[in-house]
Amino acid sequence: MPLPRLYLSPPDIGSAEIELVLEAFQSNWIAPAGPNLDAFEQDFAQLVGSNHAVAVSSGTAALHLALRLAGVGPGDEVLCSSLTFVASAAPITYLGAKPVFIDSEERSWNMDPALACAVIEQKAKAGKVPKALVLVHLYGQSADIAPIKACCDKHGVKLIEDAAEALGATYGEVSPGSFGLAGIHSFNGNKIITTGGGGMLVTDDAELAKQARFLATQARDTAPHYEHSTIGYNYRLSNISASIGLGQLTRLSGKVSRRRGHFKAYAEAFKGLPGVTMQPEAPWGQSTRWLTCLTIDPALAGVTREQVRLALEAQNIEARPVWKPMHLQPVFASAEMHGGKVSERLFDQGLCLPSGAGMSEVDRDRVITAVKNCFARE
């Protein structure tokens, strides 16, 4: 009989979530709104240090709303991290704007601040200041926010933070996602916490939060009938989904601790393997280690990232390359790109290992053994 499948980052649901969902059913607060939705937004805003939170159907929806409310429209340019998931860039195109991709820097794998600021300065001198900048906090690691925010503030570029992978991380003592005009979080099934699919927009701007909530509920004007003066979206999170998230929030610190524990154990196990380098933790804050990521230099290791991935797959263990940079994606083949060597190397050599909060030490050891076997010498 084959060994059970080990997934990269499966959901981790506990009794608190089940009790809150049952409570919602018993009270008949199913959808679209309800007390658990209100409580989830309030608790989340308090947790991340923002004044307002708006729960929506996905992180992508939250980013779409944030960009629209930042005034992004047809023909505008929006700077964006290249090394990320497509959902960081796709909403830019929803609004008819053009993504301009920026390479990563080695310390955090996130957007290179010096390069981003150079591009903004260059475009400002040419009289075409970007409308916004989407700063991704990758794999649970905050980007270096301060220099990028300073440059955005100087030139009037709206900073929007994609913290979909970084709930529970820190930049100094502050949560990434709380520095810009708006921040977005994801509650997809593979994230640090989940609502079975969902997202959150956070902001200190009361009017922006009000407008985000308005647009997310089909832009229904105040009237006894259905009145619409602008086009909105069906983006609101349900009370049932919020009930799951409300319970998940109570266990966030433990989830982060367990993921960091997995990373530490992997790093200790692999420290003698040639050509293996763990994703660094930047000096400005703590990573959640949403996923344990490493790179494999084939010239030193004698094995490629893809050979290791396939060997794990043969053992029924899910592993995945790091995100393929946006500037290498066919859909963005004609997009403007600045730099590229760092993100291209990380994609070529990078591998993500099973890192779920609920993963046992036995299962983690199974992954470790499978990786080490790829480096065994005759």
Image (cartoon, rainbow, N blue to C red):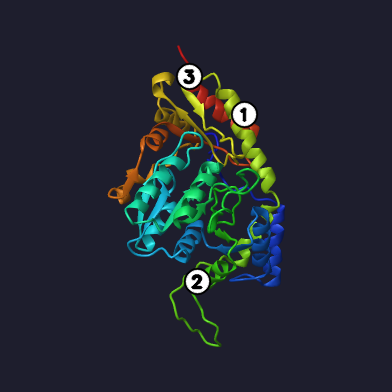
Query: What's the residue at 52%, 62% (across, down)?
Result: 57
Q: Sequence-wise, which precedes: disc 3 or disc 1?
A: 1
SS at badge 2:
helix
For label 2, the residue is 215
Crowding at label 1, few (<14), some or many (≥20) Cα neighbours within 10 Å? Answer: some
Q: Which of 273 and 201 is in front in this view?
A: 201
Specify the quadrant of the image occupied by residue 258.
Answer: top right
For the residue pair 150 and 240, the one nearer the viewer reads as 150
Q: Are marks 2 and 3 in contact (CB under 8 Å)?
A: no
Q: Which of marks 2 and 3 is in front?
A: 2
Tell me which amino acid carries mark 1.
Ala
The quadrant holding residue 22 is bottom right
Circle on res. 274: 3
- In the image, what residue occupies the spot 62% across and 66% down? 239
Q: Earlier in the sequence, mark 2 or mark 1?
A: 2
State if disc 1 and disc 2 touch (CB < 8 Å): no
- Give the residue pinned by disc 1: 265
Residue 325 higher or lower than 207, as above or below: above
Secondary structure at numbered mark 3: loop
Q: How crowded is mark 2: few (under 14 residues within 10 Å), some or many (20 or more)?
A: many
Name the residue type under label 3.
Answer: Pro
Residue 157 percent across, percent down from the top left: 45, 56
